[in-house]
Structures are given as C-alpha cells and as structure tokens.
Amino acid sequence: MSFFDTWEVLKPMHNDYMSCTEHFLGDGMLLSPAFPIACFYADHISFKGYCKRNSPSYVMSKAKRLLEISYLDSVERDWEKYRGMLGPEGGDFRFSVYVLTVVVTINLVACLFLSIYLFLAIHDRHRQFFLNIVRFAAVLSSITLILFTSRMLLLIQDEFNNLGVVTAHLIAYTLGNRLDFKILDFIAISLLQFCQLINVTRLVSTLEEKRFSFIAGFIMVMVSNILYAVSLFSSGSDSLTVLNPFVYLLRIAISTSYAAIVISFIIAKYKLCFINFSLGFLSIYSFLLVLFQVLFFFFDLANVWINSIGEIFNLTAYVASTAIVWEWINRIFVVQKKKEAQSILGRTIYAEENVDHKIAKYALKIQDALTRTISTEYSDKNSFLNDDRSSELMLRPFDEHSLNAHSTKDGKDDEIVFNIDKNQERVLTGSSSMNQTSYELSGISTCIEDSSFHNSQNSRSVTAYFKEKLHMSYNKLIMLTDYMLIKILGQNSINLSTTNGEEIENNKRKVKQRIGLDKVNDVHLYKTTDIIFNSDDEDYDTED
Amino acid sequence: MNLLTIKRIVIISLTTYSFLFHIIPNLTVPIVHSIKLAEDHDKVYGVYGWCEKHHDNICTKRRIGYPTKNLNASNPKNFLPSFTNIRVTKILVVHPIALVFEFLLWVMVILSSTNRYKNNTRFTLICALWSLPTFLLGLLCLLVDVLLFLDALSWLGWNLYPVTLANAISSTLLWSLKRNIATLRYEALSNRENVASQSNNADPIEVYSIIDIESASDDGSLLLMSSNRSKNVSILQPTHSYTVG
C-alpha cells in the first residue's frame, strides 16, 4: 500500500513557505493574552510561523477570524499555497487526515466483512484448495489492514500529542511506504490474482480454451508479480522510476482484462445471469466489483473525490472481485448444470473434443509411454548386455520350442505369455548390435518401435534431441494444466450447498425415479416385440 | 454470405482500424508536426518527443523518453500536465511495441482469410492467442497516455479507447471463429466417415432419428414407439411385475 510512489513528482514544499522563515516586521503593537502584559509596543519585531517538516502547521481555528485583523501577507500567501497543493503535504479537505481516517476505516470494515463472508457463506467442496487460497489471501489482507489502521491511529495520536496538529503527510509518506506492509500487500495480491485466473478458467467453456487461458493468464500474472517484486526490493536506480508506473499500469491492465472477460460472459449468457432476481442482483454486483479497480484508477488520476482512493481500496477491491465473482460463478454453474441435466447427454459436448481423434491419440500416447517405461525398467533391472544367459538367449533361434521350454518350467498358463513377451523384449531391447533380421523374427510392432528408438539414439542429431526434449516439456505442461483443469477445476458438478434441504431431497427423489432406483425390489418382465415399421405396414396395405 | 464470412469481415475491419490508429500515434511530433498526442499551454507532446508552440515549433530529438536537457525553458518537475516525473515518459515505449504486435496480428488475420489457412484451426488458434497480448498492449498504451497527459490528451490519445474495445471484440471473435472452424471440420470429418462406411459396407447400418426410437432391448431389437402406440400400450409398461421379499 503506497499512496504516492516515486514516479509521481514531489510537490514543491521545502523552504517554499515564507512564513516558515524568520522575517522582520519593524516596530509595532503586540496583542496577546499569553504575554505578561496583554498589549505593548515593541521595536524590531521579527516573525516566524510554527512549522513542522518545512510546512506550516495550521489548525482549524485559523479559518475563523475572531477579530477583524488581517493576517500577515506572507501567512495569507502561504495558506493559499498550502491549499493549492495536490497531495497530503497540503491541499484541501479531500487530502486531510479526516478523510483518510474515515476511508481507511471503511476499507478495513469492508475487508473484514468479506473475509468473514468467505468463511461463512461461500463453500465449494470441489475446489476447496483454491477456495482456501482465497480465504488465506482475504485473511492476509485483513491482517494487513488491521495493522495499517492501528499503526495509523497510533501515529495520529503521537502527532497530536507532540505537535498539536494532525496531517495526512506522515501517514502517507511514513506508513504508506513501509516495506513490511508492501510485502504483505504483494503476497495477498499475488494469491488473489492467481484466484482470479482460476475464475477466468472456470468461465471459459472448452477444455482447450481453459488450457490456453490458464497458461496465458499464468504467464501474465507471473510477469506482473516478478516485476513488482523487482521494483519492491530494488531502490535508488533510475530505471526504477520507469518500472514502478509500468507495474502499476500492468496491474490495472490485468484487472481490466479480468473485468472484460467477466463482462463478456455476462453479455454472452445474459439469460442465464438474469434468470432470477438474486442471480441478477449478484451479476450486477459482480459487474460493478470487477470494474472497481479501473474506476478507481481514473478517480485517482482525476483527483475527483478522495485522494488515492484506488490505492487505499486496492486490497479490498481485489478480495471483493475475487470472492464475490467466485460465488457468482458457483451459482451460475448450479443453474447451468440443472439445465444441462435435463438434456439428453447431461452436459455440453463440443466438436473440438472429438475432432482429430484427440482422446484416442491421448490414449495411444499413454499406452506408448507405459510400454516404454516397462521396457526400460525391465532392461535396466536385468542388465541384459552383461548377462551371459541373455546373450545365449539372444543367439538362440526364436522358435516355438524354446518358448515352450520356458512355459513348462514355470508351469502356469497365465504366466506363459508373460514370459514369452519378456523374453522377446529382452532380446530386442538389448539388441543394439543385432541386424535387422532379428527384429523381423519377433513380429511385434511395438517392440520394434521400442528397439528402433534405442538403436537410433546414438545417431540422432542435436536438433532432434532438443525437439524431443521440447516435445516432452510441452507434454508435461499440458499434463500439468490438464491435471489442474480436469482434476480440480473441471469438476463443475452441482454445488448443492446453496440450496435448502427440501430441494436436495426432491432432486434426489427425481434422480432415483429417473434411473429406476425408487422401486428396487420390484422385478419387471418386458415382452420382446418384433420390429414393425410404419412404412412397411403402408407398403403391405398398398400391395393388398 | 454466411456467418463465418461475416465474422471474418468484422475481424479484418476491426483489426485494420486498430492497426491504423496504432500507426498514427507513432507518427506524432516530432516526426509529423501537425499530429499531436497531447497539447498543453505552450507545448505539444508526441511519442518520441515534444515541441514548443511559440518558438517556431522547436522540437526535441526523436527518442524514447523525453530529453530533459534540451529547451531550457522547461521545468522537469512541472513539465507534464499530470505533474508526473519526466523520466516516466520512457514508458511511452509501449506505443511502438503495440504497433508491432498489432501489425503481426493484422497480417495473421489477413492470412487466416486466405484459402490456405481458412480452415486451419491451429493457425486461427495462434491468431486468437496473439490477440491477447495485443489487447493488453493496446490497453497499456491508453493507460500510459492517460497517466501522463490527463485531460491534455488530444482526440488521437482518447481514440485508443475505441481501439482497445475493437481489439477486445476482435479477440473474442477470433476465439469464436476458431470454435466454428473446429465444428465445421468435425462435421466434415463425420460426413466423410459416414460416406466411407456406407461405401465400404455392403450392408450399411441404418440410421434412425433419435426421436423415433424410445428404447432398445438387450438383444438389439428396437422397440418402436409407433408400433406400440397403435395398440395403445405404453412401451414402459411391463407385462408382469413381481415384488421381491
């Protein structure tokens, strides 16, 4: 939480106030109840205003003129200058400590409320892990804000006791730029951004789109957070002046992208989003919440309302736009799943899932990987090339007689096949010096592929090696994302936690009735009937 | 004109619009004196420098980030309309980067409408993926301009807002197009398979509409709704019922 970053110009403040320096007024009358004599004539009067941190300390009674005596010109000019500042070191009411205190307190209350709401009202057993991350981030945000508010109140108290006036200056520049708050802020926002990415992944339909949106979003979030961490822990460099606003704007851009995705979902599925009053209300609420950060950015730039409101509400806006949208998506999916359950297939089937035989290819890939693993493990275990018995086997003709000898030795029918296969594999796996004819003897295509893989390993080029490594990395990445999406996110089953008990019972009864489990003790006999087509009947009629 | 063609036309139009309005900010002062990104009392700002209005349009050298040493009349602290530090102007570098991204997207979109890549799902997917950073960079351009120049921004700067919207719409349409192409490919594939199976098999499998078939018995014989309906007997009604226990 930093109110004024280094990229903003520091407003003129040092020694700019004339009233803070001593200047001579000449001779004249002095009036004050604080003096031993209330009114007296003095020579060579000099004046110096009460200033702290090179700026005048004004109190509220300044504005109320009890006597019709004008202030010194230098004091009047400085007051105008003070009011004309755009920052907590001066400025009008919106920059004062009163507004800051109220806004920070409201922010704390809102964040605490959201954290409690997350624990009490939002349940998602299918994505419990990610929900726990959101909860953790919300708690972290609340702790940060509690610490910040309490520190702020203590500072205000100290300043009031020591100086007699309270300004927002100390809070903004001393407390707002503390590293511990910034680190807590960084961790909380990183986690919340990741959870926003999970929300986006849930919003897109097909698995392929989920996969790509997850990868693209993850890269974006990582880049943003790495740059932020760099700007957080490095100081004093010239490039930092550029990095800070860039990271700030990147965060705003990512939030805007998130808002754009949520809003486009609302527009695309507006019938579903406004199917009833509560869901419609939640949709509008989510719509506003995701736009908060963008609106606050423009508020901050325009200084229209409260100074740095975007920075103050940053954490709460992140928590709200994650938690509330999470609940909104849950409810949307409940309605969507109910509608889909009424259809024939029970869920939406996309053509992309079946095109190019992706499922079959994936199964073959798994099969291939398993075959390779078994083969490699077996060859390693038996250290074929150093085994004399295996060498003997390799030279032995591969006929039925030798296989039968093995089977007789083991004596179990179900192990015969296994032994044959193992022997074949043993011969072929370690046969790097064998000629092509020995491969032809086996006649097992999978083993040939396997052995040719081992055989060509020495001769393949560096390019092919890297290509294969790249392919393996790609496969691993896909497997990881698929694990995330299918095992954890893909289970978009109906979350019944938001419905009441009676409705659950009704749904259970309907499902039981539909699949015939309501009368389990009843046995029905159906008569088989010959197929009679209407068209056939008509043909017969016409023939008759 | 089918839906796919309309989508392609819309995507090309939007991308061309975005591309054009990413070119123009890159031509602002000091490259072309009549085009300005923002205008203050006595200064005109561009992506690669700035010019003074009242001194015969004296301009700075073309570079990323405004130079502070030239034109001694300017105060670096109060130089920009937003009172932002002048060194921050280096982030105007997002403009040329966004232009490169936009150009590549435009080329890819044009290519995707040619016969070679028209039905290529992978190429459309690449286009759709590329549109994401393009959108983000366009948005960053707008945010940077607003941050630096505030209300001094000219119409060219504010025009980046509809450009960003156009980017968002074209990105959405590209994802939608990718799904449409996949569906078309799947339909073409299934049609081809059906034709192949019918030509290879002497006795092709007869296909019935799912509406006509209500259930199928274990031995594969079909129970037709129409045959039972004529006898006013429900197909789900069993002939005999027993209760166990």
Image (spheres, rainbow, N blue to C red):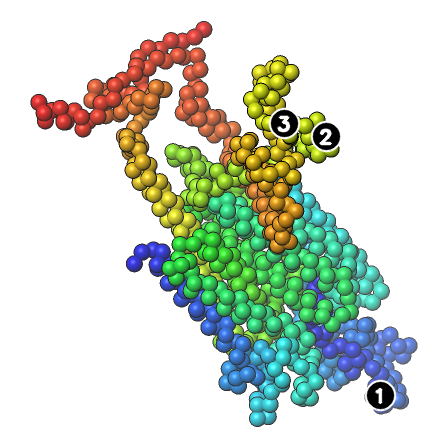
Please state the chain letter of the residue tagged with numbered disc 2 in the rendered image. A
How far separated are the C-alphas under marks 2 and 1?
Answer: 107 Å
| A492, A43: nearer the viewer | A492
Whether callout 2 and callout 1 share a subunit is answered yes
Q: Residue furthest top?
A: B245
Q: Dot 3, crowdedness within 10 Å: few (<14), some or many (≥20)?
A: few
- Label 2 with label 1: CB-CB less than 8 Å: no
Nearer to me, B226 or A477: A477
Residue shown at 62%/85% (left/top)? Answer: B60
Residue denoted by label 3: A396
Query: Mark 1 or 3, which is nearer the eye?
Result: 3
| Secondary structure found at label 2 | loop
Amino acid found under the numbered disc labelled 1: Phe
**Chain for disc number 1:** A
Q: Is residue A538 left or right of residue A346?
A: left
**Residue with the mark numbered 1:** A24
Which callout, 1 or 3, points at the residue further toward the start of the chain? 1
CA gap between label 2 and label 3 equals 14 Å
Look at 62% across and 37% down and name the residue there: A434
On the image, the x and y values in percent for residue B95 come to 56, 72
Q: Earlier in the sequence, mark 2 or mark 3?
A: 2
On residue A387, which mark appears?
2
